[in-house]
Image: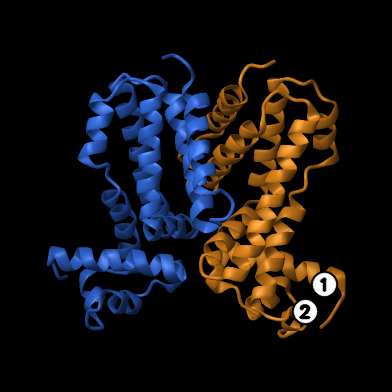
Chain colours: A blue, B orange
Amino acid sequence: MRTNPERRQALIDAAIEVLAKEGARGLTFRAVDKEAGVPAGTASNYFTNRDDLLTQAGSRFYERLQPSEATMTKLAEGPRTRANITELMMEVVGRIEAFRTGYLAILELRLEATRRPELRAILTERVRADIEFNVRNHLDSGMPGDEKSVLLLYLALNWLIVDRLTLPDIFTDEQSRELIAAAVERIVGDQD
Amino acid sequence: MRTNPERRQALIDAAIEVLAKEGARGLTFRAVDKEAGVPAGTASNYFTNRDDLLTQAGSRFYERLQPSEATMTKLAEGPRTRANITELMMEVVGRIEAFRTGYLAILELRLEATRRPELRAILTERVRADIEFNVRNHLDSGMPGDEKSVLLLYLALNWLIVDRLTLPDIFTDEQSRELIAAAVERIVGDQD
């Protein structure tokens, strides 16, 4: 098993591109080598099998979408208002939409997870950790809104992103911003 | 081009099963013939090409999920309350979740649509019609809530279904019901 960490990461990033472009079924070691521009046979030296590569691509998606310092500071130090939550949510949605291939890859992985119990277990753990992280951060921040607010925003904004990335003519940029603002206004409530 | 309508429908339903089981890439005329239990070569007599079959599978999903008479009556004649909307939403989510392979197939089609402009145009039209139907029905019903309520419920409940069907350990049945109730309560507001 090879261990060059930069090479490994480049292969995982290439796997994300292949997943988005070709679908889960198109993900082969050969396709990943080609996408990464490395000699045929390289990926097979870094991953024990295709499942290994799939699960590492899933983790990498969450790694690459970690909020920026600026966002964490805004959450920690910005005003405790709904308007600030709206700004934060627009930032999150924008950040995820900008990593288009990553989000499409994670949708491919979710569908592949319906066929692969091991992948399903790993994605379940990852999504659960992500939800818990968001709930804890929100409650610790002292922002208006409760656990249900975080869960309902998670639900609404994820499907908004699905629509925007798969059928981009459903909601325009402006409609998207209006929906995010309305979601925060109604879901967070008016405790502030 | 063969025209037996029952045979055609059986082939489209078989295509939905293949999409859910094998992914968009696994959808071939051969796989559909096999799934439908018909002689090899049958599907190719009913559809001009694979794109034709994909788009018909997309339309069929919406056809099979038409609300029941009972649901339409409840919407038309039930009490104009949030509690009634909650019941209706639980019914809709339950109906969609019960057609598990159909929903997984439509997710596969959305991902395939990122690669096929013609499929994207057809799905966009279908989804837009579905959203407009729901908005109009809701506003005509005189139920509490506005257009934004319908759109936000559409967003939140779709991703709830994605979670329930792809990573079923994220939310239990009870959590799912609580989320639907909370979504209606907050998104529809308290005009009633």
Contact between marks 1 and 2 (CB within 8 A): the answer is yes
Find disc 1 in the rendering and name its residue: B7
x 65%, y 39%: residue? B93
Q: Position of residue A43 (x, y in %)?
A: 25, 74
Residue sitting farthest toward the left: A4
Q: Position of residue A10 (x, y in %)?
A: 22, 67
Q: Is residue A118 visible?
A: no
Question: Which chain letter matches label 2?
Answer: B
Quarter of the view holding residue A89: top left
x 56%, y 71%: residue? B116
Q: Nearer the viewer, residue A43 or A187?
A: A187
x 70%, y 23%: residue? B144
* Position above or below: B85 against A62: above
Give neighbour class at mark 2: few <14, some 14-19, many 20+ (Cα, 10 Å).
many
Asked if residue A112 lies left or right of residue A59, the reply is right
Quarter of the view holding residue B112: bottom right
| Quadrant in the picture for the N terminus of chain A | bottom left
Q: Tell me the kind of residue under disc 1.
A: Arg
Report how many numbered discs are placed on residues in the image: 2
